[in-house]
């Protein structure tokens, strides 16, 4: 049942994409008609603010994290294991 | 309704059920064991529902008042979810042939319940250490060399936290003479800091957090489902009890929420990614505790409740994939949608819940914390927490399902023939039910919270705001999909300091102090120290022969001379001289006596 549904969606990729864009557009248009009683913050008044916020947050998180990773943090997958293997080998030499 | 259930004075410690059950379990087999496995957590859950408010099971030990059963609203909401989770987790592990993982897990659940109902620091500390001892067994039972090492690191880090807590308790006792486990008294800053460090370590607040992805990524499949629920949430409970309204917790919590998100981008291991999201989610609770208003404390408790359900659901989904395929890395997975469709649906429900989609459990709890921040005019905290929630959806809602079930047409390995065992699927179904039920019926959870709730998550503005953030995050995800392709890399975290840092320290010792010793000290010894020593010995020997010997010889000569003269007077050696001396002495004595008598 689920497999058939997913297959159908994958077969009609254009339709899925079209619908997704329509929903995204609908979100911003819909935001124009939402009542605004309890505005805590300037963002609650501007229509589409949270859409922009979500998009920018997502892009920022990906780019900043990837930059941190490639600049400082990434190491090969066996980083810790390799260190231990090296240590064992050097201990063997010492003996 | 709930008030009337708890009105009586009935109390039996639910932890005791788990401890006794864990002792009986190894002797049971077959269907009896399977029924027992579900019956004990269910009985504990029923017990929690009927516990009466108040202080129970109080003992006086060496002048200290020990309270094992403090029942109030805050303890009950945590105990309730701990027991629900025990039912789900035990069902999830029912397929295991051996019982020892369940024994360890029940000991773990019992310890968490013990902490929840503890009314004094001493019993809290006892159960706190119990949490560590039982959960490390769940890591070690994986049986790999990696898990053995991760377990030892876990024990070492938690021993440090436990000792900080114990020191804090000692300082508190010596300053105030009171060990009641309650809001921190002002005027004992050292005790407050030490106790807070102990709690923050278990809540996995950076930089004291690296144990969490390390251990949860290497535990057994069933073990990590249990572990993701109890340790951090017990810590949130203790923080809420003792440090509600401590401002320092707000920036710490916000930093946690973002830290977990950043590291989740870098992570290639499925369970380690979920672990970083535990850190992120616990950040909301820590920030809620720091804000400290009734609304924020309610939010922290509600989020802990919802979090246990959806995070265990995610760990169960990913655990099933590991159970079936034996793979845990994103770079090795992908293309499983045809083969594990139900696991996909359950994991997606967990992902939507943690991302706070409307009508899923995260929505009704996470928004309470953020609303608490808005109401307290902490706009920066509210905005950053909202940003972190976009990141949560990015990873747990999108990255996890996409790279496990899609990304490739077909898996890289022999595709699995069938899904995980029925009990795993049933446990995930129950978890999913709770996630959706809480999302659609928030009153179920709100009626259990410590303070009365005047909060309505389902307003048009709030739903609209959430959908905008989430759907546009999704847009960004698919736009930057190429950047997120998993690579077989690890991101360095603060565990580097004790994993590689210790190696570097050893290398430093080997190279610097040892080399200094070998080269510099040896030369110094032969060129300076030895000649100096020789000179000293020469001076000493001269002094010995000339001064000391001269003095001693002179003394001996004089003694000899004196004794010769003395002998000439005292020991003449002739009888007549002795006799004359004695008679002289006798005559003198008689004369003296006569003189005395006359006088």
Image (spheres, coloured by chain):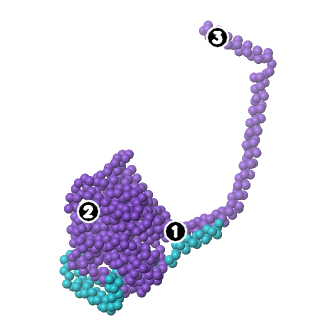
Residue drawn at 38 percent across, 74 percent down: B317
Residue farthest toward the top in the current orientation of the protein: B598
Classify the position of the N terminus of chain B by image quarter.
bottom left
Residue drawn at 68 percent across, 63 percent down: B522
The chain that appears purple in the image is B
Q: Nearer the viewer, residue B63 or B348?
A: B348
Q: On the picture, is B591 further left or further right than B302?
A: right
Q: Which residue is mark 2?
A: B450
- Picture coordinates of residue A61 (x, y %)? 38, 80
Chain ID of residue with mark 1: B
Task: Kindly report which numbered mark, 2 or 1, lies closer to the viewer in this rendering.
Answer: 1
Q: Quadrant of residue B223?
A: bottom left
Residue drawn at 39 percent across, 67 percent down: B94
Q: Which residue is mark 3?
A: B593
- Picture coordinates of residue B339 (x, y %)? 39, 81
Gap in Å between the C-alphas at discs 2 and 1?
44 Å
Q: Which residue is mark 1?
A: B145
Q: Quadrant of residue B376?
A: bottom left
Q: Earlier in the sequence, mark 3 or mark 2?
A: 2
Same subunit, labels 3 and 2: the answer reads yes
Tag 2 near tag 1, CB within 8 Å = no
- Picture coordinates of residue B530 (x, y %)? 71, 58
Q: On the picture, is B575 further left or further right than B13?
A: right
- Picture coordinates of residue B293 (x, y %)? 26, 65
Let me know if residue B590 appears in the view: yes
| Secondary element type, mark 3 | helix
| Secondary element type, mark 2 | loop
Q: Earlier in the sequence, mark 3 or mark 1?
A: 1
Q: Nearer the viewer, residue B262 or B126?
A: B126
Chain A colour in the picture: cyan
Gap in Å between the C-alphas at discs 3 and 1?
105 Å
Let me know if residue B209 appears in the view: no
């Amino acid at each position: 049942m689920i497999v058939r549904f997913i297959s159908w969606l994958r077969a009609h990729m254009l339709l899925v994409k079209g619908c997704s864009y329509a929903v995204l557009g609908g979100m911003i248009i819909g935001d124009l008609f939402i009542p605004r009683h309890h505005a805590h913050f300037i963002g609650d008044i501007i229509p589409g603010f949270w859409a922009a916020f979500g998009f920018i947050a997502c892009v920022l998180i990906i780019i900043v994290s990837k930059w941190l990773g490639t600049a400082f943090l990434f190491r090969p997958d066996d980083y810790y294991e390799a260190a231990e293997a090296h240590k064992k080998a050097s201990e063997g030499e010492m003996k | 309704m709930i008030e009337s259930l708890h009105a009586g004075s009935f109390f039996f410690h639910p932890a005791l059920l788990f401890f006794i059950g864990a002792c009986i379990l190894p002797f049971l087999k077959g269907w009896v064991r399977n029924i027992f496995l579900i019956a004990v957590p269910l009985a504990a859950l029923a017990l929690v529902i009927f516990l009466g408010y108040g202080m129970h099971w109080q003992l006086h030990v060496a002048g200290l008042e020990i309270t094992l059963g403090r029942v109030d609203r805050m303890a009950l909401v945590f105990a309730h979810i701990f027991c629900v989770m025990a039912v789900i987790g035990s069902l999830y592990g029912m397929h295991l042939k051996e019982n020892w993982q369940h024994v360890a897990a029940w000991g773990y659940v019992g310890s968490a319940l013990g902490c929840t109902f503890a009314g004094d620091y001493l019993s809290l500390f006892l159960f706190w250490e119990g949490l560590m001892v039982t959960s490390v067994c769940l890591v070690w039972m994986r049986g790999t060399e990696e898990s053995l090492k991760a377990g030892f690191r876990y024990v070492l880090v938690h021993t440090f936290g436990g000792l900080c807590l114990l020191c804090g308790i000692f300082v508190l006792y010596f300053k105030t003479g009171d060990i009641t486990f309650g809001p921190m008294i002002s005027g004992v800053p050292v005790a407050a800091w030490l106790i807070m460090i102990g709690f923050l370590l278990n809540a996995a607040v950076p930089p004291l957090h690296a144990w969490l992805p390390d251990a949860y990524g290497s535990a057994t499949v069933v073990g990590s489902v249990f572990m993701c629920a109890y340790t951090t949430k017990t810590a949130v409970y203790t923080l809420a009890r003792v440090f509600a309204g401590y401002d320092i917790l707000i920036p710490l919590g916000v930093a946690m929420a973002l830290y977990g998100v950043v590291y989740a981008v870098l992570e290639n291991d499925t369970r380690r990614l979920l672990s970083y999201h535990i850190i992120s989610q616990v950040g909301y609770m820590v920030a809620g505790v720091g804000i400290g208003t009734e609304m924020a404390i309610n939010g922290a408790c509600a989020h802990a409740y919802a979090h246990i359900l959806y995070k265990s659901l995610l760990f169960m989904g990913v655990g099933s994939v590991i159970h079936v395929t034996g793979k845990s890395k994103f770079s090795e997975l992908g293309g499983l949608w045809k083969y594990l469709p139900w696991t996909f649906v359950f994991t997606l429900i967990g992902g939507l819940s943690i991302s706070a989609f409307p009508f899923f459990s995260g929505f009704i709890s996470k928004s309470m914390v953020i609303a608490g921040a808005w109401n307290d005019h902490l706009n920066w905290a509210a905005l950053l927490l909202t940003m972190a929630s976009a990141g949560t959806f990015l990873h747990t809602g999108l990255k996890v399902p996409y790279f496990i079930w899609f990304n490739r047409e077909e898996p890289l390995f022999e595709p699995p023939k069938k899904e995980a065992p029925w009990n795993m699927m049933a446990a995930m179904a129950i978890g999913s039910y709770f996630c959706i039920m809480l999302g659609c019926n928030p009153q179920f959870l709100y009626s259990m919270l410590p303070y009365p709730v005047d909060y309505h998550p389902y307003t048009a503005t709030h739903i609209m705001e959430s959908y905008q953030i989430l759907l546009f995050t999704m847009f960004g995800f698919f736009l930057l999909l190429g950047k997120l392709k998993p690579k077989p890399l690890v991101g360095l975290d603060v565990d580097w300091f004790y994993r590689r840092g210790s190696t570097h320290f050893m290398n430093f010792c080997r190279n610097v102090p040892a080399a200094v010793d070998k080269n510099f000290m040896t030369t110094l010894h032969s060129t300076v120290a030895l000649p100096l020593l020789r000179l000293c010995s020469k001076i000493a020997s001269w002094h010995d022969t000339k001064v000391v010997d001269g003095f001693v010889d002179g003394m001996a000569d004089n003694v000899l001379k004196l004794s010769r003269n003395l002998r000439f007077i005292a020991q003449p050696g002739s009888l007549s001289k002795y006799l004359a001396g004695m008679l002289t002495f006798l005559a003198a004595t008689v004369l003296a006596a006569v003189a005395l008598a006359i006088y």
